[in-house]
Image: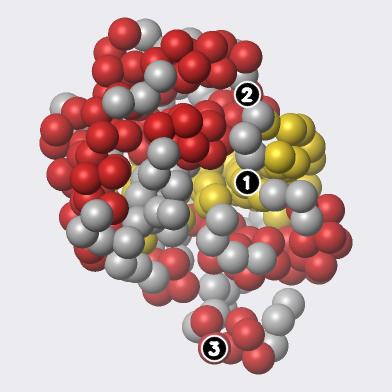
Amino acid sequence: MIDLNLLKTGADSLGVVLDDKALERFDAYAELLVFWNERINLTAITDPEGIVKKHFLDSLALLKYCDIKSDAKMIDVGTGAGFPGLAIKIARPDIDITLMDSTQKKLTVIEDIMKKIDLDANIIHSRAEEAGHDDTLREQYDFATARAVSNLRDLTEYCLPFVTIGGSFISMKGADAKAELADAEHAIEILGGKVIKFDEYELDGCGERAIINISKVSNTPDKYPRPKGKMQKQPL
């Protein structure tokens, strides 16, 4: 369905090597994404070139700007149709990835896709503000990531509780990343984080992008994350 040469060339430019099996899986992923999108609203991007550039390559950019060690544990918060988590898993099957979303229908689609491309990942149906207080999940991951979910201040409150000390929350953002970071600095400090890397870049078809790497330097206080309503009424 998709132009595999465009995908491979784009991945190469990001320093991500996709073997034949990965390319085959991405092609099947794209086809299944379009199939399911006709039944469940997953994405507005369904043209083959858009899927390659705005979903697959945009997700894989994380691997260029962040050093993800072999067998690392990562949680993708608000994974939606599997971005960036499932795309990263296809490129790096060694990573232990958990895909979390509050919408069961989306997770059902992901489970179907994984079964058909013969790939395993952990699936969690939960709201981040609830899962962040689960002792089996809290501070259990080397990395947490999120793409196009919420503003960085709230996103840090959702995601940093999952990260172990010494790990990182990696936020994938658009052109307004600097302004979001300025608004989130106080929250990042309160939640036990420290910005260690801020990368801005342009990706063909996606415009200006940014990846913000927030290291977990101390335990997140027990009361965080708070319920969504409280976060909105009393932003950090």
Q: Is residue 145 positioned above or below 231 on the image?
A: above
Residue located 63% across and 85% down the image: 232
Alpha-carbon distance for marks 1 and 2?
A: 12 Å
Q: Quick one: SS at disc 1? A: strand
Choose between 61 and 131: the one closer to the eye.
61
In this figure, which residue is indicated by the disc labeled 1?
172
Up/down of 120 relative to 10, above or below: below
On the image, which quarter does residue 133 sit in? bottom left
Closer-to-camera residue (113/45): 45
Q: Which residue is mark 3?
A: 229
**Residue 168: x and y, percent?**
61, 43
Image coordinates of residue 57 in percent, x first then y, are 53, 29
Q: Find residue 1 and name its label.
A: none
Q: Which mark is residue 64?
A: 2
49 relative to 137, above or below: above
SS label for mark 3:
helix
Task: List the single residue furthest toward the front.
Answer: 47
Q: What is the spatial separation of the Cα atoms under label 2 and label 3, in whole angstroms?
A: 36 Å
Q: CA distance from mark 3 to mark 1?
A: 24 Å
- Would residue 165 be visible to someone looking at this image? no
Q: Quadrant of the N terminus?
A: top left
